[in-house]
Image (tube, rainbow, N blue to C red):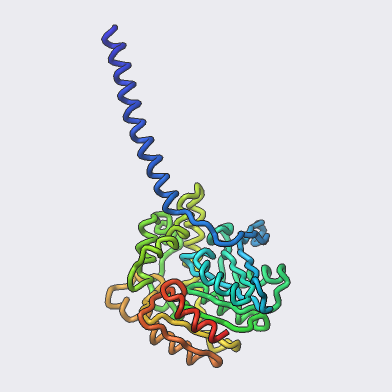
């Protein structure tokens, strides 16, 4: 009996040591994720209320005033794997130049709600228009990067009277992806999105630059914040829905309808294709050829200027900010 009692104490103690080990490992794992995947937005974040499909939602945005206003406003549209955070350095430059800067996290991204709704570029553009109306802003310069370029095109087509100038920085959608990328069901896309990790986000972002630098890590952290949320599957579903939006809602056929003055800033090393991993290796080489695509779109937009940046990848405003800013402010 005494032997059994001693054995039970030893067993329980041993079991507790094992549990403690795993608890500490788990806490270390969580701490590691949190410290790797948290960023602080550079300016105060406000929230604009929206009602979409009978759902009350909030759209996060930054509204950054200029120390010495020049009377002009710039609106920045982020890409699919980003949010307003990655505009932080450009915001500072624009503000110092006298521009008021409006930076929304589109519904489905960043600090905004991520509802289960029908996502469309028309809807995102309408949300952005409603935000501007609430701020009593009548005219804007619109700058769109990557997927934000597709949104910027739709915004300029829907509300040409509001857009003074349009800037497209390595926009996606210069091809109609559904004509050559294999179709995937929404469930398959969702299952892929829900398996995302910090490492998978980083690996994808590494493809945006000819050479990866440690200072780019912060933009992976900004994207990876959603991994910490207990309702991450909602984000994964929104990610799947917005992938489907890009795939099914091309803008490439409508560039010819853009009438506002337009600047194309195209990093020549960019080879981004939405769904590229679904293509055979030989097919991958045929698409996402931004040097040719930039010239093609420049020819399609009547009042446009093309600036080609040698040695620059998908995100010129981060990789080569001085060259990007020079092109931008020459145009503005």
Locate the C terminus and report the quarter of the image it occupies: bottom right
Determine the residue positioned at 33% across, 27% down: 17
Q: Nearer the viewer, residue 243 or 20?
A: 20
Q: Position of residue 1 (x, y in %)?
A: 29, 6
Q: Nearer the viewer, residue 105 or 323?
A: 323
Determine the residue positioned at 47% across, 62% down: 240
Res. 225 in view: yes
Determine the residue positioned at 40% across, 40% down: 27
Residue 125 appears left or right of 38: right
Residue 275 appears left or right of 77: left
Q: Is residue 67 above or below residue 40?
A: below
Determine the residue positioned at 47% across, 50% down: 228
Where residue 136 sits, quadrant-wise, is bottom right
Q: Position of residue 225 (x, y in %)?
A: 48, 55
Res. 173 in view: no
Residue placed farthest to the top in the image? 1
Q: Is residue 311 above or below residue 184?
A: below
Q: Position of residue 106 (x, y in %)?
A: 57, 65
Q: Nearer the viewer, residue 104 or 316?
A: 316
Q: Position of residue 184 (x, y in %)?
A: 41, 66
Where residue 312 sits, quadrant-wise, is bottom left
């Amino acid at each position: 009996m005494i032997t059994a009692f001693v054995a039970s104490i030893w067993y329980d103690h041993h079991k507790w040591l094992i549990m403690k080990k795993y608890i500490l490992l788990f806490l270390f794992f969580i701490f590691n994720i949190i410290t790797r995947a948290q960023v602080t937005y550079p300016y105060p974040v406000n929230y604009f209320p929206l009602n979409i499909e009978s759902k009350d939602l909030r759209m996060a945005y930054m509204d950054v005033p200029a120390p010495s206003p020049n009377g002009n406003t710039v609106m920045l549209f982020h890409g699919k794997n980003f949010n307003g955070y990655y505009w932080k350095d450009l915001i500072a430059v624009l503000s110092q130049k006298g521009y008021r800067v409006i930076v929304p996290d589109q519904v489905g991204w960043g600090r905004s709600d991520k509802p289960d709704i029908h996502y469309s570029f028309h809807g995102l553009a309408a949300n952005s228009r409603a935000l501007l109306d609430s701020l009593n802003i009548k005219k804007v310069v619109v700058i769109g990067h990557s997927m934000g370029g597709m949104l910027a095109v739709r915004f300029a087509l829907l509300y040409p009277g509001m857009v003074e100038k349009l800037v497209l920085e390595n926009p996606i959608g210069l091809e109609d992806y559904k004509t050559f990328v294999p179709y995937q069901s929404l469930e398959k896309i969702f299952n892929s999105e829900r398996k995302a990790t910090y490492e998978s986000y980083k690996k994808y972002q590494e493809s945006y630059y000819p050479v990866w630098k440690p200072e780019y890590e912060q933009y992976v952290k900004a994207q990876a914040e959603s991994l910490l949320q207990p309702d991450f599957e909602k984000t994964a579903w929104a990610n799947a829905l917005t992938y489907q939006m890009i795939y099914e809602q091309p803008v490439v056929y409508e560039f010819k309808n853009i009438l506002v003055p337009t600047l194309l800033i195209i990093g020549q090393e960019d080879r981004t294709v939405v769904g590229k991993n679904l293509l055979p290796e030989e097919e991958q080489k045929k698409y996402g050829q931004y040097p040719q695509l930039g010239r093609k779109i420049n020819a399609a937009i009547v009042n446009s200027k093309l600036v080609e940046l040698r040695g620059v990848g998908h995100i010129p405003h981060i990789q080569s900010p001085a060259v990007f800013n020079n092109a931008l402010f020459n145009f503005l």
